[in-house]
Image: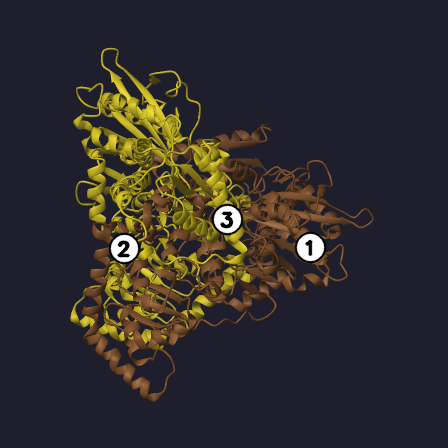
Chain colours: A brown, B yellow
Amino acid sequence: MDVTRGNFREVILELERVIPAAQFLAIDGEFTGLRAGQDVNAFDTPSQYYSKLRSGSMGFLLVQFGLCAFSYDKENDKYMHRAYNFYIFPKQQVPSSPDQRFLCQSSSIDFLASQGFDFNKLFTEGISYLTQPEEQKLRDHLEEKHKSCSNTNSSSPGTEENSYSIPIPDEYVSAVEDACSRIEAFLASSEPEELELDRCNAFVRKLIFQTVHHRFDSNAVQLESRVTEGRNRVLVVTRCGSPEERKKREKEKRDKELQDLEDAVGFSLVLKKISQSGKLIIGHNMLLDVCHVINRCYFPLPEDYSEFKEMVNCVFPKVLDTKYMSDLPLFKNRMSSNILGHMYKTLSEEPFKMCIAKSEEEGHGYNTLNDKYHEAAYDAYVTGLCFITMANHLGSLQNPKVYPVLSSSPLLNPYLNKLFLVRVQDSPYINLVGKDPIVSRDHVFFVSFPKEWKTYDLTQLFSPFGGVFIAWLSNTSAYVALYHRDQASLVLKTLTQSDTYIVMTYAAHQQLQDERAVCKCAHSSGKSMCSSCIRKRTVTKQLVPSSPTTTSVRKRRSMEALQEEPEVQTSTLKRKRSSSFGDKTSYSNRIIDPIPEEEEMDIVRHNEQASTIEAGGHGKRRTSSVDGTDSSERHGSSLGDNAKRQSKHRQFFEESDMWD
Amino acid sequence: MDVTRGNFREVILELERVIPAAQFLAIDGEFTGLRAGQDVNAFDTPSQYYSKLRSGSMGFLLVQFGLCAFSYDKENDKYMHRAYNFYIFPKQQVPSSPDQRFLCQSSSIDFLASQGFDFNKLFTEGISYLTQPEEQKLRDHLEEKHKSCSNTNSSSPGTEENSYSIPIPDEYVSAVEDACSRIEAFLASSEPEELELDRCNAFVRKLIFQTVHHRFDSNAVQLESRVTEGRNRVLVVTRCGSPEERKKREKEKRDKELQDLEDAVGFSLVLKKISQSGKLIIGHNMLLDVCHVINRCYFPLPEDYSEFKEMVNCVFPKVLDTKYMSDLPLFKNRMSSNILGHMYKTLSEEPFKMCIAKSEEEGHGYNTLNDKYHEAAYDAYVTGLCFITMANHLGSLQNPKVYPVLSSSPLLNPYLNKLFLVRVQDSPYINLVGKDPIVSRDHVFFVSFPKEWKTYDLTQLFSPFGGVFIAWLSNTSAYVALYHRDQASLVLKTLTQSDTYIVMTYAAHQQLQDERAVCKCAHSSGKSMCSSCIRKRTVTKQLVPSSPTTTSVRKRRSMEALQEEPEVQTSTLKRKRSSSFGDKTSYSNRIIDPIPEEEEMDIVRHNEQASTIEAGGHGKRRTSSVDGTDSSERHGSSLGDNAKRQSKHRQFFEESDMWD
């Protein structure tokens, strides 16, 4: 069911019953965008990945939160569910709550709209939310206000600070006098209940405020400025009535303010209830969902990566990411794709046995598969079904077989508290309750090069060492991974610095990045290492630890390279380029664009030419992100021939849908 | 009439007739937000104002553009109009067009939604647009693509760069073989027209591409990847047919691509037509509208202010801002507010004679006043009516009377090409065709102070010199303007530096800011001058030019101040504060918030307590932007008693609606 401001309070009451009774909870979110700024790289460490996600994705808004509570009826051995589709939007429920600025990504908005997402409903009826610090600030503020109000009510007027008074300019005298006469007449009568003085600009309002303050008894008349439907501000006059009436009105106002504050907290209460339940939380590719909901409804995400892990573990003590689970060999070997819809299809076929979980109540869930993918609650529902199916499949492989595999089963332990990392090559998850996996990247090199370079130039540079996988960092740098890992030492012996390009080990580059964080390099743009710094450091810093002899040899080589090799190298490359690209050089230039690869994959409608066979070799080599090339093509021609090594890299192609 | 993608092409044809026949064009825009980042200050120079607007407002989106063409029938002496309400949204019409990231402001979205703005219509049917550089890039790209495509069609396959081929991992062999068999069967039959291979992840798609390339004749089969409605990517196989068929299909595809490009240019064509018409363009408070439409549909706004003025003048050679026009004494003296609705009401009363301009055609305009304020075309319509009324009023004051005053009348010359600047104190417009007005700010001082300071502390500091107007820069700095301008020299003699605060002339601070632009101050945050730099400079830089004798005296004083005065000063202030604020200090602290003042004014719904008379003196002195205080209150208690000087400052209160 859809949950908006209109039915939120009753749903909260319902959830107080539903959540504790659930076997587990599945969640999913829809966002106004995925990423801005620096793109995730296939060789980012989990900490770097998090840092990019925090700075690049948290500016977008979580606009729909799907919650699907699955209960298990042991007696009849059947699952039931209840699905809630929360529309959430940071409307200013309370004047002092923050007026958020948030990002949207055109393609994401377009996509949601094309899926029938109701933005009008979102913006008019969306439930508000606050982080805990925001909530606390408002509570403190309200308390102070009420306290101060009581004080000022009894204080005497005309204190020192009030002594300045603005003389009324001639052209406004009549407006002010007119207002005063109307107020006088209003006070003399008993109807209507309030008097609206319209068409005042702020300065005239100020003058009226001041004059009324001087002329009228503040115990008799109350003047306030109010915003009308049309966004104009007007002054509204009311009678104060007897002290009892005023007291009563004051109390009503305070109660209303407190209620408004609860409304402002809104959806954050749902997160609180989910968190406090301690239930197993299921999501598919859930890192973004988890980050957004915590960042918006609990606490701004911390800069520090380990603090972040602690925070997630604190809010969600037990999570399971079905993207991670389905990515392990047991399931992966049977799936040619594990984006949600595909995964559901695969799990509906042999040898799996798709679970059925009917809706507990009409209108509170999904009874047939109605292909409402990308409606958050539906995605949460399908994720839950897939989870149950995979869990039971695990049980069926045990000896003796285990059935049913419920959320508390130890069979699930290997899958718990690991959040899948889309696009990371070899370390594809965040371990929330321990150290992240340690992987060797000795076969990965950082390369810096002229902006004219394309994939082809890099594959040519590394061609003596076999195939490579290229992970672009910017239009002048990339990580290059060898398929033949044993060629790594040869790379270091053969490729040294030149004026045209710079090569260093992955480890050395990572260390440079760490150092840069504390270095006050004036020409660092803050985004990527400036090349003069890289050069300075690479001359003194050796590519790899090596014996004193080879070091000095390499040092010499590297100096020679700086003096002599570049020209040769450049001209060779130029020749190679011109021979293979003919007059299409400018067309073939790689264009770097802020569009992340997987979005491009999902968004692009027409990429006929680039990805058709007819387009031939040249077409495929283009690596532009903006020309609609299928991203799998980007790395295509650089792929080598060692299947074993490649299995690591396949990761990249397979996990490219952030939209799951 | 509403204009969306559906009827855009026919409207363009209509405009080709309507625009040239128009007497003038009125425009208006609706945005997803107003401002992020640094707020405009009442003492910004026009150039600083522009710079803040460019960096803080252009991230938002123009989502509705109202165009109202007014024609004049001389024979019958009557105006007619046609109104167009363009929904515009940067959808990616062409894969290679940019995937925009844009900002929204919660309150603006909420407001538009509350006014019935149809976001679903916007996101599903909004007309696209491109800047000229974007358009050129796409045209070049398409041309290159078509050229390259012709070349590759005739080139031979299997070039060097294609020689790498990925071995097919065991688990994917069956998927690839299955695809090949299906393609074979498909080619052997004549139906259906295309074959969709679903459930492939990117890696499997790559493998299928590669295999099909090797096994099948590229003249017989065409393979492309396509995105389905559900955003999944699938491979689609089609037969190539005879060379003639292929050629025909190729041509159709190119024609389609060219048409898609025209659709992507979309609304930018309307701006072009408006610009080329050379007609008088009318807007109310039109700076933001002009900036947005140029920035999104013509050329990114330049950093340089004079370049900006040139650019606007180039796109709109003849503009008239009714906010500026109505702000001049002739009209202003009769208006207690010139926000659009109020201005319309005032101009509907004596001595003005509101113009009537019926709709030329049913459904193409407004025939009655239906209070659709904030629908862009309606606002444009009302703006046009107000303009005609004011123009004719000008004529009625001439001797002999002039009637009608048409758009070409020299009576309008004083009002042309001046864009109103909301909130600027004394220099309230940008002159597009000449120098901006020069104003003296000798009575304005820059003050830097501890973050605990509030309005009250500043008014106390300056109390010996009479009333002041305070324009906050940050929570530790502000411009303070004296009402008694002749007290300026006394300020310089009396107030020198202290450890607690720093005072310098407006001119000196402006100069520092200019210098900061080139200075590489390491501790400058880039937002405001760091206090250590300010201190360093103020010790060496004199507050005002003065004779050698007074300089040395002041130097001494200023050193003394650094050594002795601070403590005295601080304790005095502390005493003052504590005596007047009692235990409410923390409550009374000024909170600086990114919400611009006029938005706050317009958005706030409930500000009863703070702005009611009951709240008394203390309540009024709070200057928090987040607590719902009417912004006129913020400066209230600091106002002095010199009416003549104040008239300059009234500006501030009167022009606070950016929503016009």
Q: Which amino acid is tagged 1?
A: His
Q: Chain of mark 2?
A: B
Left or right: residue B403 versus residue A301 is: left
Q: Chain of mark 3?
A: B
- Separation (CA) of disc 3 from disc 1: 27 Å
Left or right: residue B421 versus residue A290 is: left
Provide the residue designation for mark 3: B177
Provide the residue designation for mark 1: A393
**Judging from the image, what secondary structure is the residue with disc 3 in?**
helix
Provide the residue designation for mark 2: B443
Q: Above or below — where is B254 with respect to A623?
A: above
Q: Nearer the viewer, mark 3 or mark 1?
A: 3
Q: Which amino acid is tagged 2?
A: His
**Numbered-mark total:** 3
Residue at 37 percent across and 79 percent down: it is A544
Q: Which amino acid is tagged 3?
A: Glu
